[in-house]
Image (cartoon, rainbow, N blue to C red):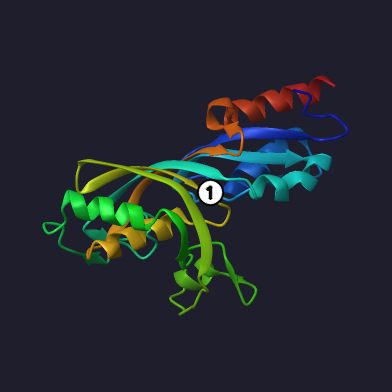
Amino acid sequence: MDYFDEQGCVILVDKPLEWTSFDVVNKIRYSGKFKKVGHAGTLDPLATGLLILCAGKKTKQIDTFQAQEKEYTGKLVLGKTTPSVDLETEFDGEFPVEHISEEDLESARQSFTGFIEQTPPVHSAVKVKGKRAYEAARKGEEIKLKSRTVEIKEFDIDTSNFPEVSFRVVCSKGTYIRSLVSDFGKALKSGAYMSELRRTRIGEFSVDDAQDVIELADKIKELRESL
């Protein structure tokens, strides 16, 4: 790939655990001394997987990539909750799971397939009065987020390690997997948090074709210095 083409370039990165999406953007921008680099869809720090970066004139395509369907795999655990619905925050609730049957799990799964209403997590990048929701949440401020309609095209679950549930989700733009996990737990008259999340696909782009960010940054830096 010509990373320094005057028309810009599209770069597929496998985001590491605990990196923010902006950490990845800044690493690639610095390594190539690009004037403009952006990403097509945020991944939380505790999520891994496909991050599409656009550099130069290709940044004009970011909205197009963001609008495409996405696929995720991950794990949720029933019976406990955290404020952030993942392991970024401490546990704040414990709930029974003994009453949950296989039929209950399947019924809940089906209820979250198709067009559904969901509210973004308070620990999210959604803006409220010009401020990121997670910034207000971390300060203990009370915030109200509006619900939105999203489409869950596919929702597969594996309950063989119950109360841990492995899942695969194919969904539309704007879907929050943490909200899906939280609502899934509530539908089962329990609670749930997400222990693992990986984005495996955006449209036709697969994480299998993505590169390690450190190796990629070194490669781009070497190419830049050789010009």
Q: On the rendered image, what quadrant is the C terminus found in? A: top right
In the figure, residue 129 lies in which quadrant? Answer: bottom right
Question: Who's the residue at 35% across and 58% down the image?
Answer: 111
In the figure, residue 107 lies in which quadrant? Answer: bottom left
Up-down: is 218 above or below 168?
Answer: above
Q: What is the residue that sits farthest to the left in this orientation?
A: 98
Q: On the rendered image, what quadrant is the N terminus found in? A: top right
Q: Which residue is mark 1?
A: 43
| Residue 214 coordinates in the image, percent (x, y) | 58, 30
| Residue 80 coordinates in the image, percent (x, y) | 24, 59
| Residue 224 coordinates in the image, percent (x, y) | 79, 26
Task: Pick whichever, 3 or 73, lies toward us.
Answer: 73
Task: Pick whichever, 221 or 129, lies toward us.
Answer: 129
Up-down: is 93 above or below 102?
Answer: below
Question: Who's the residue at 60% across and 34% down the image?
Answer: 13
> In this rendering, would 11 be left or right of 36?
left
Q: Amino acid at mark 1?
A: Leu
Question: Who's the residue at 79% across and 39% down the image?
Answer: 34
> In this rendering, would 152 be left or right of 219?
left
Label 1 element class: loop
> In this rendering, would 27 be left or right of 14?
right
Q: What is the residue that sits farthest to the right in this orientation?
A: 6
